[in-house]
Image (cartoon, helix red, strand yellow):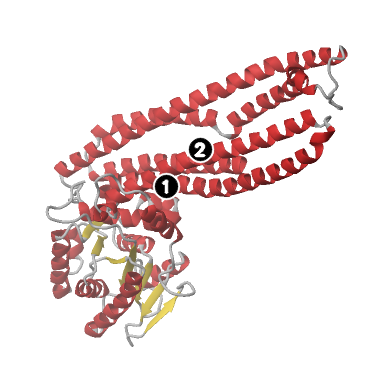
Amino acid sequence: MVTPPGCDPPPVRPVWIVGVLGHRRLDDPATLGARIEEQLRGLATAVAARGGETHAYVSAAAGTDLLAIRAARSLGLPVHILLPLDEAEFLEDFAEFPAWRDEARAALAEARAHPRRDSVQVAPTTGQRPSCYFDADARIVEGADVIVAVWNGTAAAGLGGTGQTVPLARALGKPILRIDPATGQAERSGFPPGEWPPRDEKWDWLQARTAVAPLPPGSRETEAASLQGLKARLSAIARWDSSNFRRKALLALQVTATAGVLGLVNLLLTGRVHWTIPLAITGAQSVLLVWTKVIKSHLKRSKVNDDWIQARLGAELWRGVVATYPAAGGMHPIAGRRLPEWRRFAVSVGIASQKLDRPLDLSQPGDLEEFKSGYVERLQAQIAHFEQQRDRSQLRTHRLLIVAHYCFLLAPWSVGLALLIRAAGKITILVPSPDAMSSLGVLVFTAVLPAALPLGAATATALVENFDHDRRANRYDEMPTLLRRRLAELPHLHTADSVRAFVERCEESLLKESIEWVAAQQHIAILSLGR
């Protein structure tokens, strides 16, 4: 990605999308235009108070749509126009409204003239009237965070009317701000309790965590807050928390081993009466200290593990959104469909990507080939990642299975040896003798190994099963094969629609793998951290 000359990288801010719907035929367009602008201003002010940006998402039909574009322009809001048909066909539908048609043509030209701010897209519909108009409005409803509707409250006269799309928005749980076209009065419905917009927990976590993450080497603060800086900080969080988690886990093992050593010393010295009282006091203090450390380490590992999982997932979603933005568009990120809690993040990253890069127009052959070339690099990087993870998982599985094999092999022999030693009367376990310290080796063979070897075999086997190494190794073997097969298909796709469908299939597969990875890591956390 290239920053425009003479500019600092634009910061990544949370984006809220305001979808606008409404009637075409209006008795008093000037008054309703002022009401629409008033409502957009109120929403934008509330979003700005959260440190966010407001973007308008609208079509360019006569009446309400063009009034909303006027209002958004006067407020300085970015405008994303979604057409139900190709521009030429769309404008033909408004031949009876020549003034509106000329304004629509000018609005589309303005949006195309500022590709880093605005956008113009054609909805993926059948292209058949009037269903294409309903499909486009339904897509606006799907992508919006809040709906502003100029609606008289009556049922639609036909397919694609506002009386059909507003009930759809209500069914999807979208907040609706309805403006009555007769009176200009506005009423709210479906807004959550308290202030709007509500806090976005995922974005708040992201802001809190990336604010304290180390800056990328040699970067400025403006760069760190930018699109690339966000990804660099997410990666830094993942690396830091991963190593921190290992340190916390090692500490837990160390303090647990210390408790075990104290117990063994207690066993060996029990027969010496003059050691009993000081040993009891020291043991109680040591055990209390050890388990205090264990509990603190457990809580810190839980938090660190959560942050690590979220940062790894966020970095993966970042890569997917940036790579697919020209095909998927910023209003409908693929990640937002499967992971609704990450939708704000995905939309915001996509919008920031649009500001930073020259947006590619996939209808142009040169831009289509450029996009395909960039997407090949993404798939090749994913293939290399999965192959690396496959090798690591296979190595871990192999090592654990070796431990399990030899523990199972030696366990019967250790039990037999312990029975022979006991039969020979070499040592008494239940009542240790005063010279038990000199018999430490015999104690190990008769008491420790018969219990430790079966336990080690069971533990290694459980790690293979519960930590999912075997299944993940197989999955990491399947993904490179799948992506290579997809790569062979991409050079033979020559239209924007076929490439978009291809990208969606690939990203759905990668997103599914990320979701499975998160589920596996959370499963491991439950087993290892007891939560």
Report crowding for label 2: few under 14, some 14 to 19, many 20 or more residues within 10 A (C-alpha).
some
Identify whether 191 is placed above or below 412: below
Residue situated in front as seen by the camera: 209 or 329: 209
Q: What residue is drawn where x is 40% and y is 40%?
A: 510
Q: Nearer the viewer, residue 283 or 162?
A: 283
Three-letter amino acid code of the residue under disc 2: Arg
For mark 2, what is the residue?
Answer: 246
Residue 134 in the image: x percent, y percent?
34, 63
At numbered mark 1, what does the secondary structure look like: helix, strand or loop? Answer: helix
243 to the left or right of 31: right
Where residue 401 appears, x then y in whole percent? Answer: 59, 21
Q: At numbered mark 2, what does the secondary structure look like: helix, strand or loop?
A: helix
Query: Is residue 206 found left or right of 415 in the rendered image?
Result: left
Q: Which mark is residue 311?
A: 1
In the image, residue 193 above or below residue 318: below
Query: Which mark is drawn over residue 205?
Result: none
Can residue 123 be spotted in the picture?
no
Q: Position of residue 524 (x, y in %)?
A: 57, 39
- Name the spot of residue 255 as percent of width and height, x first: 62, 38
Q: Which sits in the foreground, 274 or 40?
A: 274
Quadrant hosting residue 438: top right
